[in-house]
Amino acid sequence: MDSLIEEHRITNVAALERLYGAPAGAAVEKEIDYIHPHYRALIAASPFVVLATGSPDGLDTSPRGDAAGFVMVEDEKTLLVPDRRGNNRVDSLPRLGTMLADISQSRINGENYDRGLYERLKAALY
């Protein structure tokens, strides 16, 4: 039985692509490097976001929710996501090199974290 499992184990992207084929059409076209006006409207209406972070130390996903509009679009490259007290694990904080917000089926990729926005966000949200 172990040899059968090993025969079908997927260990790299090339093996996965042989099974599924290359992405095409809308799956490729929806990937953009800015916040499209349609996505801006979805973000403004969403009461929920999943913050996914990654670094050499590992990956983390953290659900975040509040009243619609709690995630703000600063510009076409910047999302402002307020921090809320939760379970105090702060799993996302050490991994903030990359941020991905998943709003419905829209994925927005970005890099880094601007810590200098704290006071401005605090005034806007509290």
Image (tube, grey):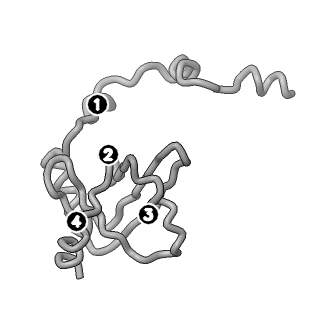
| Sequence-earlier tag: 2 or 1 | 1
> Tags 2 and 1 in contact by the CB under 8 Å rule?
no
Q: Give the image quarter of residue 80.
A: bottom left
| Sequence-earlier tag: 3 or 4 | 3
Instruction: Tell me the element at label 2.
Output: strand
Q: Residue 117 got which mark?
A: 4
Instruction: Tell me the element at label 1.
Output: helix
Q: Which of marks 3 and 1 is in front?
A: 3
Q: In which quarter of the image is the N terminus?
A: top right
Residue to which mark 1 is pinned: 26
Mark 3: few/some/many CA within 10 Å (<14, 14-19, 20+): few
Q: How far separated are the C-alphas under marks 2 and 3?
A: 19 Å
| Sequence-earlier tag: 2 or 3 | 3
Return the residue nearer the eye: 115 or 14.
Answer: 115
Residue drawn at (17%, 56%) of the image: 41
Residue to which mark 3 is pinned: 63
